[in-house]
Image (tube, rainbow, N blue to C red):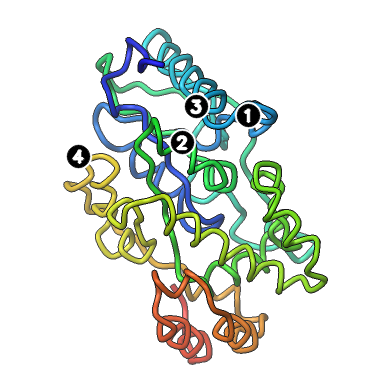
Amino acid sequence: MEPSSLAAAGSDVILTGIARSGTTLACTLLNRLPDTVALHEPMSPRMLVGLAVPEGVNDRVAAFFAAERRSLLDRGEARSRVVDGQIPDNPYAATPGPSGLRSSVVREGTVHFDKPLTPSFRLVIKHPSCFTALLGSLTERFPCHAIIRNPLAVLLSWQTTAANWNEGRQPAAEVFDADLRLRLDAEPDRLGRQLAMIAWSFGQYARYLRPESVIRYEDLIATGGAALKRVAPAAEALGEPLCSRNANPIYGDLDAAAIGRRLLATSGPQWDFYPRQAVRELVDQLASPGSGG
């Protein structure tokens, strides 16, 4: 299938990453660039269930890109998960609710863009779990990029947020990957399931993406967003004042050392992206008085 006549080749871009790795922040930063729009999970995984792989999946995704591109050019709006009509930099509340967990603050809606767009503007569509599971198909037709993060920081965020990953499940990925579903079904321990999800995610990126298409959250923060130049070259000019949340004070009630020990005892592709020392250093940082970020 040929790319949409409305889009130049390569201007429809897939963004994925480990849940809670900074993919929504990446969308917010990309939306500050000229002739670029990044949408936060506008496409429901249900739209892709049961389709032939790769042709059916890729055709449906291409059609979705084309529809949102037309809407943006005609009306300046597109579907996205939003807060008050805007894409936030973090889709979860900063503080826990009555359950002790942080709840999602985004809802399905419409986001409006006032900036001028050329017909071949760069359109980025993001989904962590679903697109990670489908990378084998998506990379055949679309430029694909992933955001990753220190795996201990990911695990700690999962413990504090009200979502499926808190229980060690990833339905939006499991529906497309039977092996992942069976692996999680067979693991009775919640943290054990989360560790399996970590290894699976990194394994997908190692298998299907070039190293330059994988962006570390830590580099995203350190460069003020400029690391996103791999997704959109104009991002090289970004210099936003960003602060790492890897040592978020909200993790203070967790036994980060115990979680870190379980993580360090694992093997898997996560260690091809992060040295074990990065986990040890984060454990030490969280144990130090006044740690934050």
Depth-wise, is mark 3 or mark 4 nearer the camera? 3
Q: Secondary structure at mark 4?
A: helix
Q: Earlier in the sequence, mark 3 or mark 1?
A: 1
Is 101 located above or below residue 212 in the figure? below
> With 230 as the anchor, is 78 left or right in this view?
right
Residue indicated by mark 3: 58
Give the quarter of the figure containing the N terminus. Answer: top left
Depth-wise, is mark 1 or mark 4 nearer the camera? 1
Give the quarter of the figure containing the C terminus. Answer: bottom left
Residue indicated by mark 4: 234
Residue at the left extreme, as displayed: 237
Q: Quadrant of residue 220?
A: bottom left
* Amino acid type shown at disc 2: Leu
* Amino acid type shown at disc 1: Leu
Is 260 located above or below residue 2 in the figure? below
User: Residue placed at 48% from the left, 43% from the top?
Assistant: 135
